Image (tube, rainbow, N blue to C red):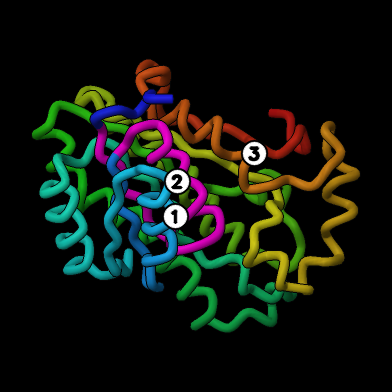
Amino acid sequence: MGRLEGKVAVITGAAQGIGALMARAMADEGARVLVTDVQDTAAAVRAITDAGGTAQGLTVDVTSNDDLAAMVDTAKAMGGLDIMVNNASIFATLQPKPFFEISDDEFDTIMRVNARGVHQVMRAIVPTMIAAGGGKVVNIASGTFYYGPPGLSHYTASKGAVIALTRCHGRELGDKNIQVNAIAPGLTESEGLAANTGFDIARAPTVASRSIKRDMLPQDLLGTLIYLASNDSNFVTGQTINVDGGKINI
């Protein structure tokens, strides 16, 4: 407890599911959390404040520069912008399909939100972090980049871009005391994914491919998140940590 005491953490895509749980975990460690999403953040904020934490909610589309400017201003009003978690992503609602059935519009939508959204967030927040003397960025990537699952080529491409951006941003910002790292989760049984039967065919084979042979839960990501958001990772940047139960060994 208290590893993020005195920090302001901003997280995108945090109205529900994995994002909401991450927001709660950072609040439990003492951070003041700005919960952002295109959906209503009230429930996620209430879960934090009911537990004694400090949080605000804000409607933010990561592809809108105006929304991102408002996000930065709100974080400053809360005391600064010490931690940025780029979690917003389109995944749980996808229906896996062969790449030749993916329309240009669907491909562009996934890339715009999942990849360009990270670029836009980073461009918006970096001046504030530099002025403050540093900060932490945690990008949520995906283990799909390493093995290329069928039916998700657009999503996999977008998360490969997140890993590439993590490496480039980490390199460019190292001398500014801003550490940029990523988490690559395995198939995670979030509330959104549980309702999507399109992924049923992948569930049993995924568990069988892991060294730790069980479903991956959203809670499995929290330890790595707090490590990367805290001072414990001050000499780590540009890295992607697989959290997948040992499916991928690289």
Please name which of the two marks, 1 or 2, marks the residue nearer to the observer: 1
C-beta proximity under 8 Å, tags 1 and 2? yes
| Image: 22 above or below 29 | below
Query: Residue at (13%, 46%) from the top-left corner?
Result: 76
Residue 31 occupies quadrant: top left
Task: Give x and y (percent) for residue 64.
Answer: 25, 70
Task: Give x and y (percent) for residue 47.
Answer: 44, 55
Query: Residue at (48%, 52%) from the top-left corner?
Result: 161
> Can residue 173 be seen in this snapshot?
no
Task: Give x and y (percent) for residue 204.
Answer: 89, 54
> Can residue 181 be seen in this snapshot?
yes
Query: Residue at (27%, 64%) from the top-left corner?
Result: 58
Q: Which mark is residue 220?
A: 3
**Residue 5 or 61: which is nearer the viewer?**
5
Packing grade of label 1 (10 A; few <14, some 14-19, many >=20) is some
To which residue does mark 1 refer? 47
To which residue does mark 2 refer? 24
Q: Is residue 19 magenta?
A: yes
What's the residue type where badge 3 is placed? Asp
Please name which of the two marks, 3 or 1, marks the residue nearer to the observer: 1
C-beta proximity under 8 Å, tags 3 and 2? no
Task: Give x and y (percent) for residue 91.
Answer: 59, 65
What's the residue type where badge 2 is placed? Arg
Q: Secondary structure at mark 1?
A: helix
Cα separation, mark 1 vs mark 2, equals: 7 Å
Quadrant for the N terminus in the image: top left
Q: Earlier in the sequence, mark 3 or mark 2?
A: 2
Q: Specify the segment rendered in magenta.
A: 7-31
